[in-house]
Amino acid sequence: MKILIIIPVFNEENNIEKCIDSFQNQTYKVSNIILVNDGSTDKTSEKINFLSKKYKNVKSYDLQNSLSKPLPGKKIIKAFNYGLSKNKVKYDFIGKFDGDLILPKNYFEILINEFKINNKLGLASGVIASMVNEKWLIENMYDKDHVRGGIKFYSKEAFKEINGLKESIGWDTLDEMQLKYSKYEIKVFKNIITKQIRKTGDRYIKKKYFNQGKVMYLLGYDVFLALVGSIKFSLKERSLMPFLKSIFSYFYCLVTNEKKIVNDKLANFIKKFRYKRIREKIGFNI
């Protein structure tokens, strides 16, 4: 079974070689890796060009006219899709990964085995650990069954079912809701620990909660779900500001009637899914 990995890369000159070396050292070999320089202002372009010469299964490209700053969502997936358009090789699995990761050697061996024994598995990953006080600690800032945006690994069939990745903020929740809607399973395996050199979200911290509020709107959340989500952000940070930023962004999108990234059927499915999760967490499930 062939694996295609696409990595959008922005200012990763210090990390990308270690990242790619960890992909090359896998016990289950990766067939093809596509690196896309996404407007980097450092020597990332030279680094990925070097890696494409060092390894036969690595190709490198520069996305022209990409903004020279880190932005979540649309910019990253535009680079991913550009890389996908350059692929000429058949694949059975496709992954969207970040360029600052160090994978354990058996990462893909474990995941491929899980896909083989479960034909309804559409998306899978391990967990991410970042350095905190000189120790690698597993990050637990998201739902336990949420596959993080930097380590998405899909079966080809599931990837095709959702028509690939949407060039929008919120893409990394949209894909999971689409898969669940199509009856695919999503698994996060706690025994596969990937090291992330840069802590999650560091690049996007200033607009983090404005973006979260917008995502809730784009995914079709109703006002109650948006309020609950925004309250959770504040409780986690022990500050009122996350709530205010998130709910302001949600209502701004509502008032300006911004176009959602879901149709009515998927929006209703997402709302039902979120309400079910709320009932489960409070111990009231019927």
Image (tube, rainbow, N blue to C red):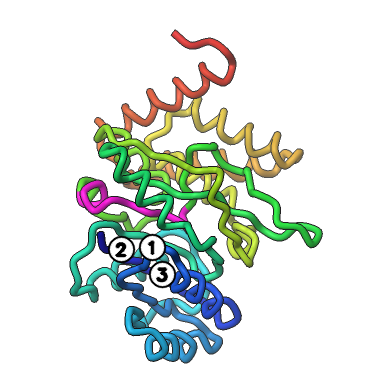
Q: Position of residue 120 (x, y in %)?
A: 27, 37
Q: Dividing the image into 4 quarters, which one contains the N terminus?
A: bottom left
Give the answer, above or below, for where 145 lies relative to 52: above
Q: Are marks 1 and 2 in contact (CB under 8 Å)?
A: yes
Q: Nearer the viewer, mark 3 or mark 2?
A: 2
Q: Nearer the viewer, mark 1 or mark 3?
A: 1
Q: Position of residue 117 (x, y in %)?
A: 31, 39
> Which residue corresponds to mark 3?
7
Instruction: Kindly state the secondary structure of the residue where label 2 is placed.
Output: strand
Q: Badge 2: how crowded within 10 Å, few (<14), some, or many (20+)? A: many
Residue 64 appears anywhere in the view = no
Quadrant of res 180: top left
Quadrant of res 50: bottom left
Residue, x 66% and y 58% (percent of image)?
A: 130
Is tag 1's residue or tag 3's residue first in the polypeptide sequence? 3
Q: Nearer the viewer, residue 266 or 45?
A: 45
> Which residue corresponds to mark 2?
3
Instruction: Residue 155: say if magenta.
Output: yes
Q: Amino acid at mark 3?
A: Ile
Residue 28 - label: 1
Q: Amino acid at mark 2?
A: Ile
